Image (cartoon, rainbow, N blue to C red):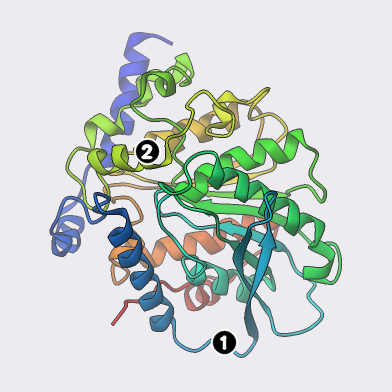
C-alpha cells in the first residue's frame, strides 16, 4: 500500500471519533471522562451489579410469551457457574440457540447484564438465549475467565437438543466488550475442536484483542498497524479511558501471546469461520481492534456485517438509552441477528422488542 493511500485510510478511521453538537450535548451529562473507576474493583463490581439490576427493573414485567430461568453449568474443576436462560414460553421451541457472554472489563458483570438483548432476541426470533457467567478478575485472573467460557460453550452445545427440543435452527455465539474478546477466542477454539453443533453465526460487539503492551502490539498484522491508533486518539472520552483499561488488564493479567487471549495468536486464524456481525463505537479506545478484526475476517473470505457509530463512546447505549442513536443501535442488533439467521425482521417490531430502558 502506498503512503498516500495508507494516510487516507488512517484519516478516514480518525474521522470516526469526530462528534456533532447533538452528540456533545447528549454526552455532557455523563460528566466524568471515565465512569468506570476500577481502582476499587469490589466497589466497581457492586456498582455494576446495582446498575444491571436497575436496568432489569426498568425493563418491566417479562412478556407473557417468554420465560426466564437460571441454571448451573459445571466447570472442569468442579465449580459451577450460573447462567440465565431466556426462551419462548411454549414447550416446543423451533428457533435458534444463542450463547451471549456479558462484558464488564473481565472484572464485573452478572447474569442480568444481557437481559435487554436476550429478551428482544428471544421475542423476535423464537430463540433460546443462554447467558453464562464466568469467574472474574482479579480473584480469578487469566485464563480462568476464558476457560470458564469454553466450558460453558461445550456444555450448551452438548445440551443443545434439550434446550431447544431439537437441534437448533441456528447456533449463534455472541458477546460484548470483554465478552466479545471471549467470542473472538471461542470462535477459533470451536473451529479447531470441531464443536458440534457448529456455530452458524457470530455477534461480536466492541471486541478487544490488542493492548498497548509491546507483545500485544506485535500481533497486529503489518498491513493494518497504521490503523491501530484509537488508544492514542481517544484520550478524553466517557465510559472508559486508557488508565482504567490498563488497570483492568492488570487485574486480568493475560498472556498476550496466547491464543486464549487473542485470535491473532491462533493457528490459521480467521479461516472457515461463520458469518460475523461486528459493531464498533467511533470514539472508543478499542475502536480499532474491532475494525481490524473485521478486516481480517473479510480478508479470509468470512462474510461480515459491520456497523460503526461515529462520535460515540464505548457502550454508549447503556449510559444514554434515551438518545435516538441508542435506540437505533438496539434495532441494529435485531437486524444483525436477522442477517445471521437469514431472516427478515420488521423495523417496528424490532424497535418494540429491542429496548434498553432508562433506569429510574
Instruction: Please give the label number shown on residue 63.
Output: 1
* Above or below for 155 versus 58: above
Judged from this view, the residue extending furthest toward the front is 78
Please, what secondary structure does the residue beneath circle 1 have?
loop
Using the rendered view, name the quadrant where residue 21 is placed: bottom left
Q: Can residue 186 be seen in this view?
A: yes
The span from disc 2 to disc 1 (Cα, nearest Å) is 38 Å
Residue 71 percent coordinates (x, y): 66, 71
Q: Which image quarter is the C terminus in? A: bottom left
Pick whichever, 207 or 133, lies toward us.
133
Viewer-side residue, 266 vs 338: 266
Residue, x 68% and y 62% (percent of image)?
73
Is label 2 in a helix, a strand or a loop? Answer: helix
- Residue 271's label in the rendered image is none
Can residue 168 be seen here?
no
Q: Do the residues labelled 2 and 1 touch (CB within 8 Å)?
A: no
Tag of residue 249: 2
Above-or-below relation of 128 to 192: below
Residue 88 spot, x, y in % from top left: 69, 80
Left/right placement of residue 14 relative to residue 111 reads left
Amino acid at each position: 500500500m502506498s503512503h498516500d493511500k495508507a494516510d487516507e485510510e488512517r484519516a478516514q478511521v480518525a474521522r470516526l471519533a469526530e462528534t456533532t453538537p447533538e452528540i456533545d450535548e447528549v454526552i455532557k451529562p455523563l460528566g466524568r471522562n471515565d465512569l468506570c473507576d476500577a481502582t476499587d474493583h469490589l466497589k466497581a463490581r457492586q456498582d455494576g451489579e446495582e446498575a444491571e439490576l436497575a436496568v432489569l427493573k426498568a425493563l418491566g414485567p417479562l412478556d407473557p410469551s417468554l420465560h426466564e430461568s437460571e441454571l448451573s453449568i459445571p466447570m472442569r474443576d468442579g465449580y459451577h457457574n450460573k447462567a440465565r436462560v431466556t426462551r419462548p414460553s411454549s414447550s416446543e421451541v423451533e428457533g435458534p440457540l444463542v450463547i451471549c457472554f456479558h462484558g464488564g472489563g473481565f472484572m464485573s458483570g452478572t447474569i442480568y447484564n444481557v437481559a435487554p438483548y436476550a429478551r428482544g432476541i428471544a421475542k423476535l426470533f423464537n430463540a433460546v438465549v443462554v447467558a453464562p457467567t464466568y469467574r472474574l478478575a482479579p480473584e480469578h485472573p487469566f485464563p480462568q475467565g476464558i476457560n470458564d467460557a469454553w466450558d460453558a460453550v461445550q456444555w450448551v452445545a452438548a445440551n443443545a437438543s434439550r434446550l431447544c427440543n431439537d437441534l437448533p435452527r441456528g447456533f449463534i455465539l455472541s458477546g460484548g466488550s470483554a465478552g466479545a474478546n471471549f467470542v473472538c477466542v471461542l470462535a477459533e477454539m470451536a473451529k479447531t475442536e470441531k464443536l458440534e453443533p457448529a456455530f452458524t453465526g457470530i455477534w461480536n460487539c466492541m471486541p478487544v484483542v490488542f493492548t498497548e503492551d509491546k507483545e500485544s502490539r506485535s500481533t497486529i498484522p503489518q498491513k493494518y498497524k497504521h490503523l491501530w491508533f484509537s488508544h492514542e486518539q481517544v484520550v478524553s472520552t466517557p465510559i472508559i479511558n486508557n488508565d482504567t483499561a490498563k488497570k483492568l488488564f492488570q487485574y486480568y493479567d493475560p498472556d498476550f501471546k496466547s491464543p486464549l487471549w487473542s485470535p491473532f495468536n491462533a493457528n490459521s486464524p480467521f479461516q472457515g469461520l461463520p458469518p460475523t456481525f461486528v459493531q464498533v463505537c467511533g470514539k472508543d479506545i478499542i475502536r480499532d481492534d474491532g475494525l481490524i478484526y473485521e478486516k481480517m475476517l473479510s480478508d479470509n473470505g468470512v462474510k461480515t456485517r459491520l456497523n460503526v457509530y461515529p462520535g460515540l463512546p464505548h457502550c454508549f447505549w447503556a449510559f444514554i438509552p434515551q438518545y435516538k442513536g441508542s435506540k437505533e443501535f438496539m434495532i441494529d442488533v435485531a437486524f444483525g441477528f436477522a442477517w445471521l439467521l437469514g431472516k427478515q425482521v420488521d423495523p417496528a417490531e424490532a424497535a418494540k422488542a429491542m429496548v434498553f430502558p432508562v433506569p429510574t
